[in-house]
Amino acid sequence: MKRYDSSSDSSDYYDPPLVYSDDDINLDINDGDKSDSSEATCIFCDGKFSEDTRGKVWVKCVMCQMWAHLDCAGAETASYVCDFCK
């Protein structure tokens, strides 16, 4: 599975990659979410991250910090804002 955290931005000029692979990061790291990041639920289809097949791409809204499948969200930029926060 792949996840993208669009809220992490270390510089005004840094353009983070659109996708992070779980091979590159430790998903057990507490990234500030109130719940376990492996139990994230897609805000559109209610699918659970822990139940997805490997290779699914997830994005995180920079406003509400909620997760969604890239396919469900239709995110096109690194600074994703979900439909609920727009």
Image (spheres, rainbow, N blue to C red):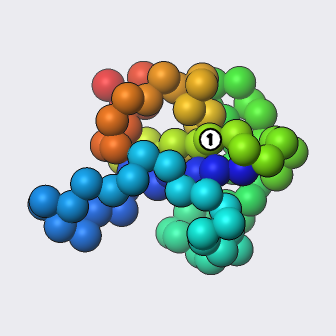
Element at label 1: strand
Reply above or below: 78 against 17: above
> Residue 33 location, x and y as percent?
56, 63
> Residue 85 location, x and y as percent?
37, 30
Q: Which residue is mark 1?
A: 57
> Residue 19 location, x and y as percent?
50, 49
Residue ID at (42%, 23%)? 83
**Residue 44 in view (yes/no):** yes
Q: Residue furthest left?
A: 12
> Residue 47 location, x and y as percent?
77, 34
Place residue 76 in its image quadrant: top left
Residue ID at (48%, 23%)? 74
Reply above or below: 11 against 80: below
What amino acid is found at the position of numbered circle 1 in the picture? Val
Residue ID at (21%, 61%)? 14
Reply above or below: 71 against 67: above
**Residue 84 in view (yes/no):** no
